[in-house]
């Protein structure tokens, strides 16, 4: 279907504006080149080779992944310097060892002494070292050793002195930027995460340990504070697509969002003042529920429409106010959804349709599973 | 990995108890054989060949699907008598025509005169007829012509008299049973849907039209009312797995649920009184949010645990009351989630791991997309 307009696609369909993808990727590359910080883009939003190529500027080096399936997928396709930034899962140590022994540089992450113990018990072949990032929780409240705990420094020291293991870096995810509204609040969280990370690096230095540092999240990396220049790396991911959530946070404008879900009107329900569309939660995901005045997505060009509910293959659309003018929405007509959360919407699609200026230029196939 | 215990799986993993699947399927087959009504099982929950085999008692005939991708997948693998029970999508008419011309019996569904007009404009080759079900909305409030509208009878008559088109049946989905609690309420909705459908069949008879009738939903078909014996077909789907939602509605007991998501503890967070598990919304889906006291799922064997939040690859678990005893949940230990909505959880998995009595017996691969 290359060369055809995106309107020729059967729906629902996830479409990517490749020009916006490239612009979003290049802006991030330029921003961190200027700041003198290594950009290690996260693959979790798209999980495709093509987009990884764009995000790494073609180098196929220096990426971060959220699943071991992604790590293997990229390793199998010539990528290297891969950081599997997920608290070392005890069931996957052997697979991690295999990647460590096969790639130039495969890096794992941990936040508990028991995980370190597992690595110690599985020395790598050929005198190779486990490359380990320690995850620090700087206020995000998910994974990581809490920055304020004495155990954090102790664990870092233990990693550094364990035979066969190298403390590669300290990694903090500032997902707490997702609660921000506007650049000022983003800056505040970015500053706090940076400060706490750099303070921890100082503590390490005081005990004779030096290693890399990395923080990340799309909001903070889209609006870095000056002190982030003192970090070794940053690791944002969602920015390559962006989404409505990111525009609400203040990471981007709605015009920067590279992803859409195309859908068609399949029903008129005048007795309920509703339209039915052929996109349910298998097409747009359940993310966004209750978070937007326009429901599960923004319906592009129709600010008065709301996607009020989704079931497996159906969406119900109604006007924010007034009566629907059905003549504007004949059966079969296209509507364009801007996803609330592009990671969640993309995860529902076995293939992404890529266009430039509305003309199809190809298909990208993500990897799935773990 | 056949023969190994399910605990050997890397997590998260969706596991199916094949014995429960078979029992659930057989009970439904027996129930409708006894009632003298044709069971046309719905494939939307699992989308696999193996489960379709079990649900059709090995006949590979008489199924219903929610997407054209499912229709093609089953057609490509020797299934026939397929009903694509989705308001005829205007962008897929040609693909529907191809299936109609290729299979012994491919059936479509519509609820609008414009859709009928599309079929009229695309006569099938070799003197074949379009087999058309008309969707009737008997109170579910999603797709279908409203039963009380005069246009419903008119559309049925128009289908019946259109050249090249046959009115195969009248189809009602009683998804409004999902609001029920207990068998009495399920019976009330089943009775109402049956009554309205049969009344419509009488109206058709009065104008000289006879065709099939079908209603469906897992709650109503798990607890049929006597009058359902007067229907031609029923079309439930979820029952083959069931889930926590169905047990809450009263369709089944929690013991009947055939599906689980296995997950492992990957973090201890005593400062938050929480555990982290390796199952986020990519493993369990976002369905269930706010609907269960135990959060996004039921954690089997741990009634005091709640899955309070999920992000892409992480779940946060905390006790309903009291302090977590971390010694009960060492890093790497397995937890078993019973999904709130099995259709939604299954949709997140590229493969299902099938076991009998806890020993792996195979893998089933679903189809995806549209």
Image (cartoon, coloured by chain):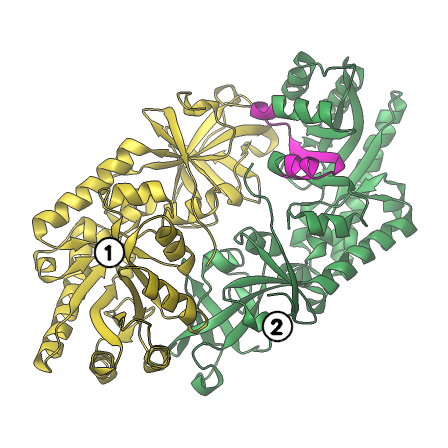
Chain colours: A green, B yellow
Q: In this view, does A198 lie above or below B139?
A: above
Given the image, what chain letter belongs to the residue carrying mark 1? Answer: B
- Asked whether residue B48 appears in the rendered view, the answer is yes
Q: Is residue B103 left or right of residue B330?
A: left
Asked if the magenta segment contains residue A78, the reply would be yes
Which quadrant is the N terminus of chain B positioned in? top left
Q: Which of A77 and B276 is in front in this view?
A: A77
- The percent position of residue A169, horizontal first and vertical second, equals 80, 30
Q: Residue at x 77, y 19 (%)?
A: A129
Q: Name the residue under label 2.
A: A5
Q: Closer to the camera, A288 or A237?
A: A237
B332 left or right of B114 in image: right
Element carrying mark 1:
loop
Q: Which structural element holds mark 2? A: loop
Magenta-span inclusion, residue B144? no
Disc number for residue A98: none
**Could you tell me residue B199's position as x and y percent?**
12, 73
Q: Are marks 2 and 1 on the same chain?
A: no
Q: Which chain carries label 2?
A: A
**Magenta residues, start to end:** A70-92
Q: Dot 1 corresponds to which residue?
A: B235
Quote the CA–CA distance across marks 2 and 1: 37 Å
Above or below — where is A165 with respect to B181?
Answer: above
């Amino acid at each position: 279907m290359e060369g055809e307009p995106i309107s020729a696609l059967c729906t629902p369909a996830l479409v990517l504006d490749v020009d916006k993808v490239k612009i979003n990727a290049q802006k991030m590359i330029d921003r961190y080149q200027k700041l003198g910080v290594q950009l290690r883009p996260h693959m979790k939003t798209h999980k495709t080779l093509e987009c990884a190529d764009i995000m790494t500027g073609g180098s196929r080096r220096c990426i971060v992944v959220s699943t071991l399936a992604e790590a293997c997928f990229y390793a199998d396709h010539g990528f290297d310097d891969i950081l599997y930034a997920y608290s070392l899962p005890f069931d996957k140590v052997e697979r991690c060892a295999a990647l460590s022994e096969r790639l130039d540089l495969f890096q794992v992450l941990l936040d508990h002494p028991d995980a370190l113990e597992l690595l110690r018990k599985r020395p790598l072949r050929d005198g190779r070292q486990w490359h380990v990032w320690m995850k620090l929780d700087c206020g995000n409240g998910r994974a990581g050793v809490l920055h304020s705990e004495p155990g954090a420094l102790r664990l870092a020291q233990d990693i550094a002195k364990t035979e066969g293991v190298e403390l590669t870096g300290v990694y903090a995810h500032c997902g707490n930027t997702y609660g921000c509204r506007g650049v000022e609040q983003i800056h505040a969280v970015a500053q706090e995460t940076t400060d706490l990370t750099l303070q921890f690096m100082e503590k390490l230095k005081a005990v004779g340990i030096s290693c890399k540092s990395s923080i990340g999240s799309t909001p903070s990396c889209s609006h870095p504070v000056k002190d982030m220049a003192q970090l070794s790396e940053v690791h944002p991911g969602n920015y390559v697509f962006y989404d409505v959530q990111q525009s609400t946070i203040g990471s981007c404008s709605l015009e920067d969002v590279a992803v859409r879900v195309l859908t068609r009107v399949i029903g008129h329900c005048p007795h309920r003042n509703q339209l039915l569309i052929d996109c349910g939660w298998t097409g747009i995901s359940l993310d966004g529920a209750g978070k937007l005045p326009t429901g599960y997505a923004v319906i592009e060009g129709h600010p008065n429409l709301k996607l009020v509910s989704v079931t497996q293959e159906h969406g119900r659309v109604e006007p924010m106010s007034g009566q629907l003018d059905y003549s504007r929405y004949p059966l079969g007509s296209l509507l364009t959804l801007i996803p609330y959360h592009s990671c969640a919407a993309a995860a529902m699609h076995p293939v992404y349709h890529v266009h430039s200026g509305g003309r199809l230029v190809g298909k990208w196939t993500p990897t799935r599973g773990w």
